[in-house]
Structures are given as C-alpha cells and as structure tokens.
Amino acid sequence: MSRAARKQSSATRRDHRRTRQEQRRTGRVAAGPVRMWRNRLTLMAAGMVGLVIVASAGMQNTSAVVLQSTLDAHWRGQYDILVTAPTATDPAIPASGSTVVPDALTIDQGRNTLTAEQLASIRSIAGVDVAAPIGQLAIPAAQVVQPVYLNVPLDAPGTAPAPQAYAITSTLTTTDGLSQTANSNTDYVIIDQSQWQGYAAESTDRYLPSGTVRLRALSSSGAGAMGDEVDPQTSFDYTFGDVLPKTDPSGQGVVRLPVSVPAAQNAIVTLVDPVAEKQLLGDSAGSFLDPLIASSSIINRASNGGSPVAAQLNPDDSLTTLQDKGVLSNVSPVLVRSDTMPVAHLDLTATPLTIAGADLETPLKETFSTTDAATAEAPEAPFPSDQLKAAASTPQASPVTLYSGDAGPELSPFSTNGLLVNWPGYNPPALPWYTKFAEFAPGSSGIDGISTKAITAPTFGSDQASGTATIGAQGYADPFQFATLDPALNRGQHTDENPPTSTVTDPRDEAQYFSLTAPNLTIDAKTRAFTKTPWPVGTFSGADVAEQADPVSAVPLGYTEAAPAVVTSPSGAPISGAAAAAPASFSGLGINPNAATALADIANAPTWGVDSPIASVRVRVGGITGFTDEAVQKVLHVAEAIRALGLRATVVSGSSPQNVPVDVLGYASPPSPPSPSASLPQLPSVGDGAVITASWPSLGAAASAQSGVSASALLTLVLAIAASTVLFATVMFASIAGRREQSGVLRQLGFTSRRRFRFFISEDAATVVLLALLAGAAVAFSSVPQLVEVTAGASVGIALLVSVAVAIAAVVRPRAERARAVNTRADRPRRPDARASMVGSIGGFAVRQAATRKLSTVTNLLATLFVGVAAGLAVITFARSQHTAGSSRVAALTLTQGAVIEGALLLMTAVAALALIGVSRRREREQNAQVDTAMLAAGWTRRDLSKAWRLSTAAAAIPGAVLACAVTASLAAGQVPAPALALAVALTLGGSLAAYLAAARH
C-alpha cells in the first residue's frame, strides 16, 4: 500500500470514530448493556433464570450434604451381617422388596444350626468386632403342676362340719388379636373344712413306708391336698425339717387344692451370650443383661444337697448362697420379658352340690405304700364322679364367684407362685418375704422343672402377583397337647374321654404358627424329675431396649420385637378405628409369640441336652464410621470371608424397618359362641382373610433412599432450570411486537437490516453474558458439577438461540406489513374496521383481542402450560423417588428432609415465574394503552376493560390448563400410584390457575 493510501485509510477511520462519538453524544443509539439495564422486563427474566440456576445448584448441594449426614447417622443398626447355616431357610423373603423376617434370627424350620467351632471361626475373621450368637427353645409346661390353687380355710367359723362337694368351673378367655377363644373345664371336688388338729391327726406318720393319709380335698382330676399350717414356715419346716408329728403344732389349718385350668403354657427362651450381647448393644442399652452376667457362676453348678430352712435365709442372699443353702438346685438363670403379658381373663366359680346319702368321707382316705421302684396310692372308696356330674346337671344352689380378672402375670410359665385364690370370706395373713421362692410358696411350687423342645418356624413367603408377604401355618394345635410333657405329671389335666391329638395337623381352637419338636428330652426315667429349672433373676422390657436403638436403622435382635398390628379380621373385614396390636398368645406360640419370652445364657444349652443351640450369629464389623464406599466394602469383605467358611451371610447394614402387610393364610377361628360346657372347643372354621402388619427390616434401604433422594434432587434441579428457561424464552418472544416497533423507527432513521440486527443482539448479548456468569457460579457451588454444567450450559445456549431468533424476528418485517407498504392507497385515511365496530359485548371484545394478538395469546397459553406441567412434574418426581427409595423409615426421613429443600426451590421458581408472567402481561397492557383509551372513549368503563382482559387471558389459559393436565396425565400414567396421579393433575390445575391469576391480575 502506498503512503497516500495509508493516509486516506487512517483519515477514514478517524471519520468513522468521530461519527460514532457524535452518535453517542447525541443519544441516537445507546450501548447494548445500557439498553439491557433499561429493559427491566428482559432484565428480570434473565435475573430469574440466573437466580434459579444458582439457587438450584446451592440447594442441591445442601440436599446432598444433608442426605449424606443423615445416612451417616442412620445407615447401621446394632450389627451388619446375619450369619445362618447354609441349609437354613433364607432369612430374606421377596416381599415389599427384600425384607428379613425377624424370626430367622432365632428359629429355623429344619433346625439347621451352627456349631461352637463355626462361631469361633467367625470371630477369628479379620474385621469382626462382635459376633453374638442367638438361639431359641421352647419349654412346654414349665409348670408341671396346676398354677391355680384354691386356698380353703380349715376349722374356720361357718365352715361345714362334714365334707362338701362342689363343681369348680374355670373359664380362660384368651385372644391373639384375630379371634377370641374361651376354654372351659369343670373339676368336681370334695372339700373337708372340719376341725384342724394338726399333722398327727392327718397322717399316722408321713415318713413311714406305709400308712393311711386323710386328704382334706380331692378333685375328679386326681389332684389331692392334705391340711397344712397357715404359717408357711411351720408347714415347710414340718415337711423338710425335723419337726415330727409328736411335736405337732396346734395352729390354724388351711388346704390348698390345685384347680384344672385349660392353660397351654409354653415358655419361649431365647439363648444369647450375655457378654457379647452387651457389647453388641453398648454398655448403656445392654445394662439389663447384668443380672445374667452376674449369675453365670451358678450355671451347671449343683447345690450342696442341704435342706433349706426359711429361718436361715436372708433377703440379700446371692444366688450362689441360696444354692448353697439348698433353696436353688440345678437352676438356669433367666431374664423374663415384662412388657408383653398375654390377655388371659380367668373366671372361676364354685357350685355346691347335694347328693342324698352319698359317702364323701371315705374317698378322702388313701392308703399308700412306698418301695424302691414306685409309690402306690389306693383310696378306700372310689371318687363318686358320676354322682357329682349328675348332681351338677340339676344344681340346687347358685354358683359362687371365686375369681374373675386378668390372670396373665400369675399364669405366666415363669411365675414361681402361680395364682392363689382365697375361698369366699377368707383373708389369710400376709405372707413372709421368702415365699417368693417356690419351695416356700403356699401350695406347690410354680416351677418344678423343664424339658426343652426345639421350635420350628412358620412358613413365610410372598404372593407372586401382589408381592404381599404371607405367613402360613405349620398346623393347628390344641393347647392341651402342650400342657405337660410327662403324662404322669399331668393327671386329670382335662376330663375329655378322647384325648386331643398329639399332632399339629388338625385344626383346633388356636392357630399355632410355631410347632414343637422334641429332640432334647432330658427326663430322668427313674425319678421322673426334670434336670434343669429356669429361675428368674430379673426382668427386662423389650420396648425399653428397642427405644434405645436408632428407630431408623434398627435391626431385629430376636427378643425385643413389637407385636404386629391387626389390620383385617379373619373374615376379611377391616378393623374399625386404628389398627390394634395383636396381644401375646397365652400359649407362648401363635401369631405373636413374644409373650412368654425369657433370655438365658447360651451356656445353659448343654445341660438342657442341646448340642447346637446357635440358630444364627449377628456380626458387627469394626472400624466403620460413615456411609462411604470404603465402609460398604469392609462389610462386604467380611461377608465374603464368612461365605468362604461355607455359611450363609446376609448383609443387613444399610437396612431400615418398614411396615409390611402380611396375609395370614389358613387361620382357624374358634366357633362363635364357644360352648362353655364343653371340655374341649369344637372344630373352628379356617380362612385366609386375616391381614396383620409387621415391622421388618428392608435390605438395602439406605442405598435405595440415597438413590431415590438424589434422583429427586437432581430432577428437581433440572425441572427448575428448564421451567425458568422456557418462561424466559416466552418472555423474549412476547417482546417481538415491541421490538418490531423499535425496528420500524430505526428503519426510518436509516438503519439497515444488518445494523438493526446488531442493535438488538448487542442488547441481548449482555443478557446472555450475565446468564453465563451466573451459570459458572452455579457449577462452582454444585456438588455434581457435571450435571449442572449440562443443564446450565443448555439454559445459556437456549437463551442465546432465543435472543438470535427474537432479533431476527424483530428485523424481518411481517408479510402483511410489507403488503401495506406497497399499497398505493396506504396514505389514504382508512375507515374504521367494520368488524371492530361490531364488538358490542365484553366477551366479543375479549375474543377479538385473543384472536388478533396471536403472539400474546400463544405466549399466555405456553406460560400456563409450562407452570401447570412443572407443578405436576414435581409430584411425579417425588412419587417416583419415593418408589425408588422404598417405604422404610430411613427413606421416609431422607425424603422428608429432601422434600423441604426441593419444595423451597420449586416454590421459589414458581413465585419468580408467576411474577414474571404478571409483569409480562402488564407490559403488554401498557403497549396496548391506545386500545384501552379508544374503548373508554366509546363509553366503556375500566371495570368492563378489566373483565374483557381477564376473559382474553382465560381464552389462552383454559386451553393451556387442559393441555397441561393431558401432558401430566400422560407422563404419570403407569409410573405413579393412582393417588399420586390425582394429586399431580390437581397441582397441575392449581399451577395453571395460579398462572392465569398472575396474568389476569394486570
């Protein structure tokens, strides 16, 4: 280039620079950022989008932090892995996802147990912090004698001078929550309340090998009772001490007669290692185990063989001391659960019987002989059963109530004294403290001994179609079959000529979902004595122990489970009101077997004849704090090491309790009403209508909750950004009409199309730059920057494309306008539009405005559509997240926390969107002020105009709301439950209505 050319180019550039400076000074064209700042509507739209992007990222980050801290605190229960035998029933069933049946801890249908060697191998695995074994046994008839006694005074004022016969009827009414059962039994007894003259008058000598005994009471069941001193110590010292008949006391006498009560008592004993159990629970929560730990020294320890004397006892004596004194012998210390007593209402009546000419004296006299082999008893006259039954059929006197009330605690298999019922009018003196020991209790001992039996579990499953959990009965059992193990110790338990079946396959009066097998019989055939006796050393509340655990991540312990709730009766009818907890079964088995539960040291098992008492082992892995990938891998590593031993390892860490509906299959309801005169109930009806709700841990609940809540948070973030971006686009498109007017003015000023495009795009470029800066801040704040990069980047990209499209639309002249520009009559004054003059009603004017201002109508329709769909999608998103997270407690907790944050984000987005719609509509009204002025000049009122604009807005909002509901329904169909679908559609309508009100308000 020549020197002259360079000078000319430089001069040209100076001229152009002076021209641009002159234009800026004269204000002909303001800079793009300045115009953006002046355009408050566009600025508000961009600010709303940027605010939502930043707030979404920040709230999502907050949600992630809250979720992680929640899972850190609630993802583990007391143990991480449940170990069972490889051939045992899988503890997890595919009901409501995958849940663990709590009974899998303690019992197994095949008695597939673990050995002590396998327990030691588990404890030797690296990473195992605690390995706590657990098992369960049944003790049928821990009380081998009747637990109910009549306390009848002798030689008392008003007593009969001769023996009197009575019909003693007992009715025990129990319920398992599904049905009520009343078992009745009648004993015919002869009671002699004549003068008491001491032990010498009752027997020639109790210690002679042969002699005659005069009974004071005898029952048709075969139970008899001699007279005793009212003072328990005197009676005890005479029986076991050195007080002989020649030094016979002369106090007041009393007779204590056992009464046959149809009570099927089975003590369920859970075996644990109390030291390991306390480590599993923690020092505070496991402190209730201290009595078991302290009494471990008397396990397998025989007494010194001495005879106890009450005067030598001290209330502060330890168990070892009491054992040395002969009070306790071959006992097994147990902790009795105190918060699940069964419902057992007992009614006991006595009806005097009159038999003309009957001899009631002679049957009370018995001659006995004792040899090394056995003891034989022979009454001098047979018991007049037939005569007493005949007299009872036509009683001459009304029955007298001996007892009526709840006898559950006294009839418990672990009660040492049983229930002592005083004869009407008799108030015995207070008993001394040492009568808490069975040896010193009035009457006979409550606990004489035990024989252990294994428990077989019910069959849990899942309905293939509905996924509902099911529980199937092993069979049904008459409670009498569990009354006692040894028939010789069960004489006269009931008077039915045909004894009840000994199997559990025939339906009877109570559904027994746990059956018993007898592999552990430990009876001495010669002495017919049980070799081990459970002895309560304290009580514990399963509810109190459970309360000290985290309710969100609690796992079943095997002895603290709450009673299931009854939802539907056996007939299929829903329970009215709130679901009631199923009371503990009096039999100790049944649907809720937690009633007669006690804890014992597993070291007792060998003396009970149980070689392999371990049903499962609960393992806690050490060195774990939060819910991290490293922690999960530690648990899985230990689980794999356990599986390498050939055992089944079920990972329960990360689980959480959830309420599972359980269909009770084949439940046997008793006949209604039960027959009080029958010694055994009639056969019941069997049905499948009953439904109970149990709390079972859901496996993998923490991971499911994390997935569901995270997905919900991310979808909410995307929804908020997408909704705000779309509304930003609608606002920008709504500005096309105003920009076209600006474009026309600029065209008159000589701006070319290209220059007008640069004019508009420079204004919007500042908006896009602002959005990009806010998007960058959102990416920096977010805990998932990859996702925010995509969503925020897409939002900025859409804003850029919309800005370009709006700038092009503002520059390009519509076809109608171009046609008018070339019309030769364009400069002529136009006559008023005939159609406009025909608008004579408010509705017609509103329809006319909606039809002629198509862009405004479409914008309002889209705004209504997007706000409504966004509201419905919020419900769909939460419902899908809830389905993913599950129905466990940890899912409920995390979803609730996440819903608060996500709800705040959606509310903020909705408020900003509605505000933007309102401002946009107001700007539109301002741009159409000439129309309002013309209509006012034509005689309309401002109220008419407001009504017309609302109708015009409704013309766009109604189709938008219909489309929004259709879109929401199509998105939710088959994805969410019907209630969630209805709520989503309702919120869609609500969002659409809110959008309409925001637009119509201006």
Image: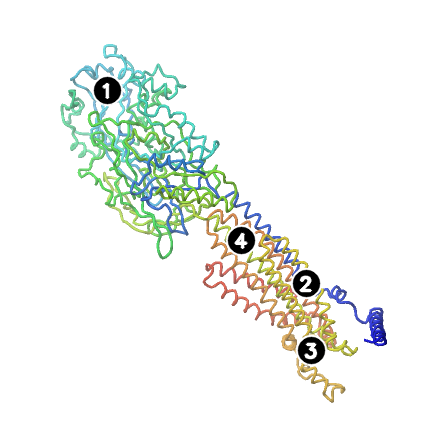
Which residue is identified by label 3? 812
Tell me the CA gap for discs 2 and 4.
Answer: 28 Å
Three-letter amino acid code of the residue under disc 2: Ala
Three-letter amino acid code of the residue under disc 1: Ser
Residue 362 higher or lower than 892, as above or below: above
Which residue is identified by label 2? 46
> Which type of secondary structure does the marked residue at label 2 adopt?
helix
Res. 345 visible in picture: no
Residue 529 higher or lower than 675, as above or below: above
| In this rendering, the label closer to the viewer, 1 or 3 | 3
* Residue 450 in picture, x, y percent from top left: 28, 30
Which residue is identified by label 4? 710
Label 3 neighbour load within 10 Å: few <14, some 14-19, many 20+: some
Tell me the CA gap for discs 3 and 2.
Answer: 24 Å
- Of labels 4 and 3, earlier in sequence is 4
Quadrant including the C terminus = bottom right
Residue 677 is labelled as: none
Number of dots carrying numbers: 4
- Of labels 1 and 4, earlier in sequence is 1
Q: Residue furthest bottom?
A: 824
Three-letter amino acid code of the residue under disc 4: Ser
